[in-house]
Image: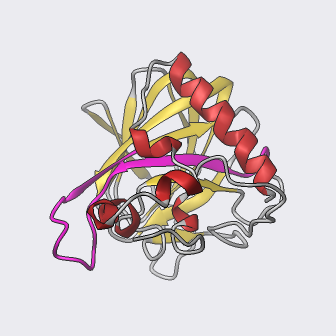
Amino acid sequence: MKRSEINRILREAVAFANEKQFLLPPYAFWGKKEWATKGAEYDEIKDNMLGWDITDFGSGDYDKVGLLMFTLRNGNFNDDRYIKSYCEKLLISKVGQITPFHFHFKKMEDIINRGGGVLAMQLYNSTPDGEFADTDVMVSQDGRNYYVKAGSIIKIKPGESVTYYPGIYHQFWAEEAPVLIGEVSKVNDDRVDNRFYSVPGRFPKIEEDEEPLYLMQMDYSDIKVDW
């Protein structure tokens, strides 16, 4: 992905979040100059992968296969300094844009439609070797627990939510209009806790054709700041 494309996506995301009255924390708007003034008291942001995360999953076409995320709070699998047992994210899914099939090994998560269009989700259980199972999938949706056939598509309207347990394959996309998605989960680490069915990569390669508007998670180690 080009940095100019990422900057455009960030501007659109901030405008959409503001439209839905979801306000972001100050570090969402820090670029290289702002980060250069920050000390070790901000290590939690870097260590726990807080902030922006934009990916095309290696597709080369973000508008068709991609997702924007912002991690607001998170614990850490490997650092006892951080005792939070939970994570919260903001996601934005566009019409015609798929987040491809994946499941999590450890993480249980609630996915909430915070506003916009309808969020469509296709579900499978996974087999021990990571394939799609043909068994019925249990859905936990706003206090209602029921089963659907393997490969079924469920649709979540604004205000509704669904719980995903570890091992449930899901892919999702927005219908009718972009969707502002909330995610509330156990501790999240996208470096080790995702199993994608078939994607080239979780994190994009960035072509630096202009300066970053705001730093993303993957920039914290690449761009030198004075920690």
- Describe residue 48's horizontal placement relative to residue 135 as left or right: left
Task: Residue 141 in the image: state x and y as whole percent.
Answer: 34, 34
Most common secondary structure along the magenta stretch: loop
132 with respect to 166 (left or right): right
Q: Quadrant of residue 173?
A: top right
Note whether residue 150 is visible: no
Residue 47 rendering spot, x and y as whole percentages: 36, 69
- Residue 47 on the magenta span: no
| Residue at the image point whose x is 56% and y is 66% from the top | 218
**Start-end of magenta stretch:** 62-89
Q: What is the basis of the colouring in this image?
A: secondary structure
Which residue corresponds to the image point at 65% horizontal and 40% vertical from the top-left?
Answer: 10
x, y percentage for residue 96?
76, 37
Question: Which is nearer the eye, 155 or 9?
Answer: 9
| Residue 64 higher or lower than 158, as above or below | below
Residue 89 lies, with reference to residue 198, above or below; the image says above
The C terminus, quarter of image = bottom left
Q: Is residue 64 left or right of residue 138?
A: right
The quadrant of the rendering that contains the N terminus is: bottom right
78 part of magenta stretch: yes
Q: Nearer the viewer, residue 55 or 127?
A: 55
Residue 108 in view, yes or no: yes
Residue at 52% over, 30% down:
180
Image quarter of residue 82? bottom left
Q: How many tags in the picture?
A: 0
Residue 70: where, in percent of width, then height? 48, 47
Which is more toward the observer, 147 or 123?
123
Towards the viewer: 143 or 196: 196
Q: Residue at x 45, y 80 (%)?
A: 128
